[in-house]
Structures are given as structure tokens and as C-alpha cells.
Image: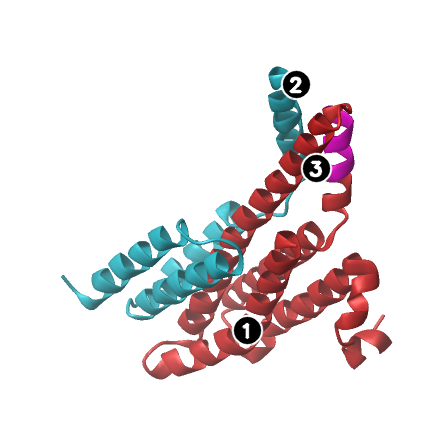
Amino acid sequence: MRNRRLTLALLATAAALVFFLPMLALLSGCGASAVQRHSYVAEAVDDVTQVARGLVLEARQDALRAAGRTASEAGLPTAEAIAAAADAFDAGPMVVTYNVLVEAKNAYVRALLARIREHRRPGMEELRPFVLGLLRAYAAHREALGIRADRLPLIPELEVAP
Amino acid sequence: MNGKKIILWAANAVDSLSDLSQGPARMGVKAVAVLLRTLARVLERRTVAETTAMLEDILANGAKPLTAEELDEQERKIAEEFAAKG
């Protein structure tokens, strides 16, 4: 239950960032250059992913310990129960979504760096790999949730995109 | 003390508070700390060279995907804890 709430919180925060960070970058840009505005976004996204990483590892640790305790109380081998819990957790929405989010962040930073090295002014299109990555994270999250994914709405573009 | 330092101090204070909360509340508190840090950054001006160095640093030292080795290590430690308890 706690894992699911954490996952949903992670997803909600990521979704909020899609709308909030570009807005923040634009609003903060009265005196700042486009490069600076994008760097604020990149650093904030990195901060969020660092926090998310800690939370995912913490939730995984809780899940493995819970499995170990349950097995111990039932007199079953704890190592096997912990391994099974680890496999289930790693295939679940938290690890899958986190890894896709980090890839999205890195794709965004790489796109920004490429633009800067070409001495070209970064624009909103540099946010594209990040936003697409978030959409992929949403799709991966939905898939990893399995049957519970029915409760999450589909994003039409993702249904038609390869 | 300038505005940026005050905001960073507030961000660290909020971050410390997150240790007292759990679950979604913890995530929310940490998100506030991230927003405050972002605000502090907006108050500083950087050259393009400094920004490039910062972006390279994010790629090199920023959040990374969780690797199989890292996850296996966590699993091994917890399994050893339980094995030690008998």
C-alpha cells in the first residue's frame, strides 16, 4: 500500500514538473539568458531525480525487509523470500518509472549541451526529449502496474506512436 | 546574508523536516526544498561556460539509473541481515 502511494506521489510530482518547470524557466527569464533558464530546469529535474532515487531505494529496502520478516515468522527460508520480493519490486512500477525518468533527464541535458556547443540558442524544443521521456515513463509505469493500470487514463499519442 | 543564502538556508531546513514525515508527505516536503533551491539558483547569474560545466557535471555525477549490481547489493545485505538473525 505504502509502495503504491509512493509510486503515485512520484508520478504526480513528475507530472507536475512537466507543467511547472518550463513555466518557471520562462518566468524566471526576465534577466536570464535562454541557456541559464534551461540550466535552472535541468538542475531542478536532477534534484528531483536524486530525491526519487533515495525514495525508490528506501521503498525497495522496506519491501525486502517485510518479505524477510514474513518468511522468518512463517519459518520459511528468508533468502528465497527476499529474492522473490526483489524480483517483483524490480519489475514493478517504481524502479521501471524511475529509470525511464533518469534517461529522460539525461536526454534533455545532452540535447542542451549539444545546442550550447553549436553556439545556438536553446529553445523550448530542447524540452522535447524530456517531455517525451516523461510520457514514456508514464507508459512504462502504466504497463508495470499491470492490472491496476486500468485505473490510469491512456495518452492517445502514446497509443499510436511507435 | 543575501537573498540566495537565506533561500538556501530555508531549503536545507525544509529538507531536514522531510526526515520527520513519511510517504507522499515526505515527497511533498522534499519537492518544496527542490523548489526553494531552484529559486536560489534563479538569483545567481552564470556565464555560458559555467552553465556548460554544470550541465556536464549533471551528466557525470547526477542521478543515475538503478543498476542490477546496485540492486543485487541491497538484496544481498538484507538477506545477510536476516541470515545473521537466524
Q: Mark 2 points at which residue?
A: B83
Residue nearest the viewer, comparing A61 with A120: A61
**Amino acid type, mark 2:** Ala
Q: Residue at x 54, y 66 (%)?
A: A112
CA gap, disc 1 and disc 2: 43 Å
Q: Which of A104 and A49 is in front in this view?
A: A49
**Quadrant hosting residue A138:** bottom right
Q: In which quarter of the image is residue A37?
A: bottom left
Front label number (1 vs 2): 2
Q: Is mark 3 on a helix, strand or loop?
A: helix
Location of the N terminus of chain A (image quadrant): bottom right
The span from disc 3 to disc 2 (Cα, nearest Å) is 22 Å
Q: Which residue lies furthest to the front in this view?
A: A74
Residue A57 is situated, as x and y percent measured from the top left of the image, at 58, 43
Type of secondary structure dominating the magenta stretch = helix
Residue picked out by circle 1: A16
Along the viewing direction, whichever of A51 and B2 lies nearer the viewer: A51
| Same chain, labels 1 and 2 | no
Q: Are marks 1 and 2 in contact (CB under 8 Å)?
A: no
Task: Please indicate, yes or no, whether residue B3 appears anywhere in the rendered image.
Answer: yes
Q: Circle 3 is placed at which residue position?
A: B68
Say which residue appears at 29% left-offset and 66% top-offset.
B44
Name the residue type under label 3: Ala
**Number of residues whose C-alpha sits closer than 10 Å to that of mark 1, classed few (under 14), some (14–19) or many (20 or more):** few
Based on the picture, tell me whether residue B74 belongs to the magenta stretch: no
Magenta range is: A79-85
Q: In this view, does B12 lie above or below A87?
A: below
Above or below for B26 versus A35: above
Chain A is which colour?
red
Q: Which residue is painted at 34% across and 51% down in the image?
A: B16
